[in-house]
Image: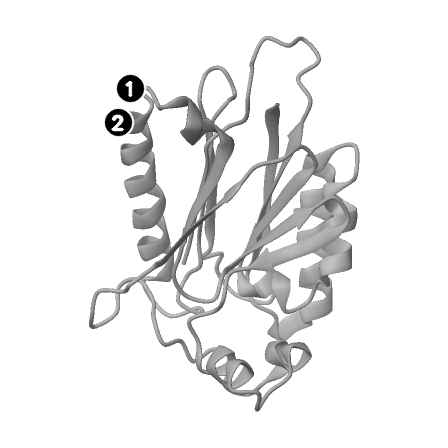
Amino acid sequence: MIWQAAKAEAIGGRKEQQDRVELFESRDGSERLLVLADGMGGHSGGAIAADAVVETARSLWRKHILQPLAPEQLLRANWAHVGDSRLYRFRGSDLVGRTLDHSVVQMLVDMGKVDEEEMATHPDQNRLTQSLGGDSDPEPDLESARVEMGDGFVLCSDGLWERVTTDEMLEALGAEVLNVEAKRLVELAADRGGADGDNVTIALARTAADKAEKRRGGGLFGLFSS
């Protein structure tokens, strides 16, 4: 089992692209780290903050690849999450879960006062309860799941999930060329967002059979979103 991954971004209706996304891969392709950092809603310094997240991840990844992992770790996907960027997990044709936003609207959904479908257009959608760089240190959600053949992941900023359905995400994961689909989805979301739309950023990843059978087992799959 190996990983296939792709990334893409679009400026949307903003004056500046403040989102950042990066893919890191081990030499044998058995491990990947996907990092996505949303900016600050167009506020000054948002791009600098997002750059800092990616550069910190880059430094940690370089240290990580020098240390071998136990075999059981290579069969798991691990992720950390803060804010309202999201990780969606698909198994085959099914959505098996997503990260829960650290936001006021997510709290309202959890309380049964707002429907899931209303989140993207709710007036309080951008009110976060946790974020990187705030007045207090965040407490990220740390989760993991066992990897199986046919699993797919979508890591995206709110500029994408507010405009694109999970069916469209699944369609992209099933396409032949992920790079093409990643670009198509961000352009679709940016077009739907129009002049008032947010930055749009995505990373796609899926498991695939290794035809050469040079790499055995699965791969540690690390993700971070903010």
Secondary element type, mark 1 = loop
Tell me the residue at 29%/63% (across/down): 139
Give the vertical position of 68 relative to 114 (above or below). Answer: above
Look at the image and tell me in which quarter the C terminus lies: bottom left
Tell me the residue at 32%/54% (across/down): 48
**Residue in the foreground of this view, choosing between 56 and 143:** 143
Marker disc for residue 213: none
191 with respect to 27 (left or right): right
Task: Estimate the x, y position of residue 173 in percent, counting from the top left.
Answer: 72, 43
Tell me the residue at 57%/91% (across/down): 113
Mark 1 crowd level (few <14, some 14–19, many ≥20, 10 Å Cα):
few
Q: Amino acid at mark 1?
A: Leu
Secondary element type, mark 2 = helix
Residue under numbered circle 1:
66
Marker disc for residue 63: 2
Task: Estimate the x, y position of residue 211 in percent, counting from the top left.
Answer: 71, 13
- How far is the residue under mark 1 from the one under mark 2? 6 Å
Task: Estimate the x, y position of residue 225 in percent, counting from the top left.
Answer: 43, 54
Hey, which quadrant is residue 45 in on the image?
A: bottom left
**Residue in the foreground of this view, choosing between 186 and 17:** 186
19 with respect to 137 (left or right): right
Q: How is the image coloured?
A: one colour
Q: How many marks?
A: 2
Q: Amino acid at mark 2?
A: Lys
Q: Give the residue at the far bottom of this rendering.
A: 113
Give the vertical position of 36 relative to 67 (above or below). Answer: below
Q: Give the residue at the far left of this rendering.
A: 136
Look at the image and tell me in which quarter the N terminus lies: top right
**Residue in the foreground of this view, choosing between 142 and 13:** 142
Mark 2 crowd level (few <14, some 14–19, many ≥20, 10 Å Cα):
few
Q: Check whether the beta carbons of the residues at disc 1 and disc 2 lie within 8 A of each other.
A: yes
Task: Estimate the x, y position of residue 91 in percent, counting from the top left.
Answer: 69, 45
